[in-house]
Amino acid sequence: MTLGRRIAGRVLSGALVLLAAITLAFLSVHVAPGDIVDIIVGDQIPAPEVEAAIRAEWGLDRPLIVQYLSYLGRVLQGDFGRSYMLQTDVFPLLTGQLLPTLKLTAAAFVVAVVFAVVTALLTAHRPIGGRIMGGLELFLVSTPSFWLGIVLLYVFSFTLKIFPVAGDRSFSALVLPALALGLSLGAVVAQVLRQSLERALEEPFALTVRSWGAGEGTLRLRHALRHAAIPSVTLAGWLIGGLLGGAVITEQVFGRPGLGRVTVDAVLSKDIPVVLAVAIFSSAIYVTLSTAVDLLCLALDPRIRTGGR
Amino acid sequence: MSLIDIKGLHIAFPGVGEVVHGIDLTIAPGESVALVGESGSGKSVTARSLLGLGGIVRAERFTIDGEDVRTHAERDWRRIRGRRIGYVLQDALTSLDPLRRIGQQVADAGAPDRAGALRILSSVGIPAPETRLPQYPHQLSGGLRQRALIGTAIAREPALVIADEPTTALDVTVQKQILDLLEARKAAGNALLLISHDLAVVARLASRVLVMRNGRVVEEGPTSEVLRHPRHPYTRQLLDAIPTAASRGKRLAPRGADPLPPKHIDASRTVLEVQDLHKRFSGTPAVNGVSFRLAAGEALGIVGESGSGKTTVARMVMGLTEPDSGRILLDGQQFSRIPEVQRRPLRAGVQLIAQDPLGSFDPRYTVERIVGESLDTLGVFGAERRARVREVLEAVHLPERFLQSRPRDLSGGQRQRVAIARAFAPRPRLIVADEPVSALDVSIQAQVLDLLAELQAEFGTALLFISHDLGVVHHLTDRMIVMRGGEVVEEGDVTRVFTAPKAPYTRELIAAIPTL
């Protein structure tokens, strides 16, 4: 199979997964308890004609398959419907909130990658350094990011007054949330990366590279890191998906706007169109990430490009 | 002045202790010296110490090009590596960085520019080197890959090249090409330190040989002298362990006092019949019209290089891969292209011995469970199973205390004994052995071959023996098939094939075997 067909196949299967996710999200909302009429009308007992009018307004009187197909058609055009509670279009509502979340996730990702690569490169096969960093990583992994966030706030904002306490006005406001979110992710990746780096350094080619007179830095950066990167990239892809979940809480702690807050509000008020859109958004992000991870692995390892030898 | 001058070399590893106990080694410019020994003898560790790689080194004298290296720091060693001493490992598939292009790696190793890289690659006999620069190691054939690896070692024109088992993973014709290349370098006046367990390879390349055992040199001298008139019993044992035509029907290992039991081939009883097998993998024919038969008690060797289809034949005989067409009859019963429900009761009749026993064992199982599991399909359980397992372990000369051991605790030879015990436990009519000794040292190989011959004769089992090592096949089997590109190019009595080969390819294979 050629490389082009492999890539096309991967992207296509990503699209199919996304379609399945949309379908599943749509169906599960219909299976779930709770009725739109109760949500909108509240505690009053509605008159039958009011109830029918509400159902007709939201298109709920039509057969399920018609509702599904029209929803799918609208989603493909970027129309996720109107929020029950806020009475505004969902798409602009979410995209407006997505940007801060993406900013936070991206910053956290950078923190994670830098932390993981630097500590792994410096401490692989270093008995003392490895043990110290291993302990620190264990601490970071087992610490919930919101708690880490509170500690960081206490130290750097309240005590040292270096970074602002809350909000999203400047770059410096991004630093602490990104650290809180990124360090625990970075710690997990660092552990995997160090282990695979150590394995790569024990491969016969490492001996060959040393026998050329190459220094330890060259061996690690130019040769071993790429081998070690493959499992770590796969793991990191998964974890970034998880970052979005982590972002929900971190956004609360640091009082930041973002997708997380919208989601929490929507779930609490059973605002179905928003919940659906969030579910679809996050599966789209997951699918994009896992496709990107697979393509990145193809780029990293020439051996899997042709499907083995 | 000697290139290398070492006296009283000790090498230790933290947590392991001393592994090399005071050896002397000198290499003159242009000289080619061999270190011979089995795994664990300290030969590779010694070679690596010349590059300052690994181990805590202590020596009375240790000079390279007259320079005392005993107090060298990492930075000083890097001036020696690649520049004065080049290093070639076995199996370029893992010894070159699999994720970097050949051209990049030759540059990493010190080629000044593209022209330099091309010059280096053509000097190691790579045709059309410009097509190889953008390729990855896995895209090259085994021979080209090994040449490229040698190319990286000589990129900075070192005065000495250390070749550590440079041909161990290679097919015999490819091995010959690599030996020719090393010989040409030697003829051009380059010094060579060859590390090998293969005495025939050593005989071809080295003018002086050091035989190592347990971190000591037990014998040293001119190669022809040592190989023809070994003085130390260990050297003699190594030489006796090499399977050849002359060793047919005899034991290879020193246990040798009791002769092998006589072999009974019952030509009237066909155990395995293979008729016109064909198999394609995604369009490419892997096996193309292979037929043969195997009588009770007979040993049939299948010889061929990687990609010849010999392992695919073995898998089809085992019922692990379905042939596209053709038939396999086991004891006259249809064994191929039948539903698994029908095949399963027959499976106990054909057993496998794989190349890497560690990989074919569940690491958490004990020896008793590993061997006993093969009796599942026969419905042998409880006291009867325990008795059978003990009986078969005794047959492979493993004491009962190994019953509760796990694969990891066993040595390579012991593991292969367990694999043999597992294969013989259900008393199969046929055993398929796929490269069962190619991962073993020569003396362990000798013990395993002796054991196979012994059990095969004792139980009258038919043996389908797959190997790329012609010496082993010559020693052990009665008849042989030579395969190439999925087809049988020659079939016949082993002695006939070796003395009067008909097919040109068989002649080429036999000519490529290095001899003592």
Image (cartoon, coloured by chain):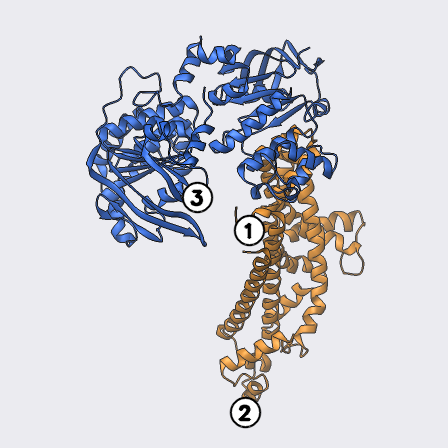
Chain colours: A orange, B blue
The amino acid type, in three-letter code, at marker 1 is Thr
The amino acid type, in three-letter code, at marker 2 is Glu
In the rendered image, which quarter is residue B153 located in?
A: top right
Image quadrant for the C terminus of chain B?
top left
How busy is the neighbourhood of tag 1: few (under 14 within 10 Å), some, or many (20 plus)? few
Residue B272 in view, yes or no: yes
The amino acid type, in three-letter code, at marker 3 is Gly
CA distance for labels 2 and 1: 64 Å
Frontmost residue, B191 versus A153: B191
In the rendered image, which quarter is residue B303 located in?
A: top left
**Looking at the image, which residue is at 59% across and 81% down?**
A40
Tell me the chain of label 1.
A
CA distance for labels 2 and 3: 81 Å
Regarding mark 3 in the picture, which secondary structure is present there? loop
**Looking at the image, which residue is at 61% across and 75% down?**
A75
Q: Which residue lies furthest to the left in this view?
A: B268
Tell me the chain of label 3.
B
Q: Name the residue under label 3.
A: B485
How busy is the neighbourhood of tag 3: few (under 14 within 10 Å), some, or many (20 plus)? some
Q: Are the residues under badges 3 and 1 in a single subunit? A: no
Looking at the image, is B468 positioned above or below residue A256?
above
B144 with respect to B440 (left or right): right
CA distance for labels 3 and 1: 22 Å
Looking at the image, is B108 positioned above or below residue A95?
above
Q: Mark 2 points at which residue?
A: A49
Regarding mark 1 in the picture, which secondary structure is present there? loop
Q: Name the residue under label 1.
A: A306
Q: Are the residues under badges 2 and 3 in a single subunit? A: no
